[in-house]
Amino acid sequence: AQTVTQSQPEMSVQEAETVTLSCTYDTSESDYYLFWYKQPPSRQMILVIRQEAYKQQNATENRFSVNFQKAAKSFSLKISDSQLGDAAMYFCAYRSPKAAGNKLTFGGGTRVLVKP
Amino acid sequence: EPEVTQTPSHQVTQMGQEVILRCVPISNHLYFYWYRQILGQKVEFLVSFYNNEISEKSEIFDDQFSVERPDGSNFTLKIRSTKLEDSAMYFCASSELLGHTEAFFGQGTRLTVV
């Protein structure tokens, strides 16, 4: 079974600075999908960014980018020019394209605090 | 922009009672899911549903739980005889296709069992 680990329970960043959240996962599959979801205080889960394992190029969405290291099974999220609205829980998630149920397996989350 | 809608936003129920959590997935989506998040813990998969049947369920999803798509638009999660440990945030999600598209989540229903 796949597992996802986020080793940082909490990260603090100064407004306008950069913060990097780590995520590692365990899988025997070669093809899969990785995601970062943001959960603000409203507790809704919002997709931030996705990465297909077969793509070598790291995904980027505006101020959010990932560093995908397939051999190391690492998928970190970088938030550049941090804004107050970035304060939230961030969850890394894995999905196998082969799983019958298409389910997501989530890490334990990292809380991001943004200091003005 | 289309979105997944869940009702109610907060449900308080007595232990032992039955609750039904409701979701309206995005209209052209084919896969539907329920996830649970106990306060302070990770989001856990409960069940996925496709073509009017369960595709996969976790060990959490025991006989106490059931899902249904009663009318082609709603997707419900029923919890029979609720327990205190069922208190959690329940998220509905939907996706368009298997494997290649992301799941979109609703805003969640906070279930409190007293």
Image: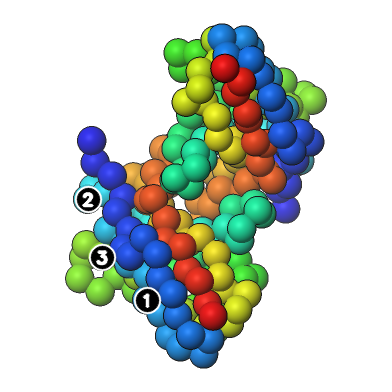
Amino acid beneath label 3: Asn
Q: Residues within 10 Å of mark 3 (few under 14, many from 20)?
A: some
Name which of mark 2 and mark 3 comes first in the sequence: 2
Closer to us: A98 or B61? B61
**Which quadrant holds the C terminus of chain B?**
bottom right
First reached walking from the N terminus: tag 3 or tag 1? 1
Do dots 3 and 1 share one subunit? yes
Q: Position of residue B113 (x, y in %)?
A: 52, 77
Q: Is residue B70 left or right of residue B105?
A: left
Left or right for B98, reference A97: left
Q: Quadrant of residue A52?
A: top right
Label number found at residue B74: 3
Q: Which residue is mark 2?
A: B27
How far apart, in angstroms, are the residues tagged by discs 3 and 1? 12 Å
Q: Quadrant of the N terminus of chain B?
A: top left
> In this figure, which residue is indicated by the disc labeled 1?
B20
Expressed as whole percent of the image width and height from the top left, the position of residue A53 reads: 60, 27
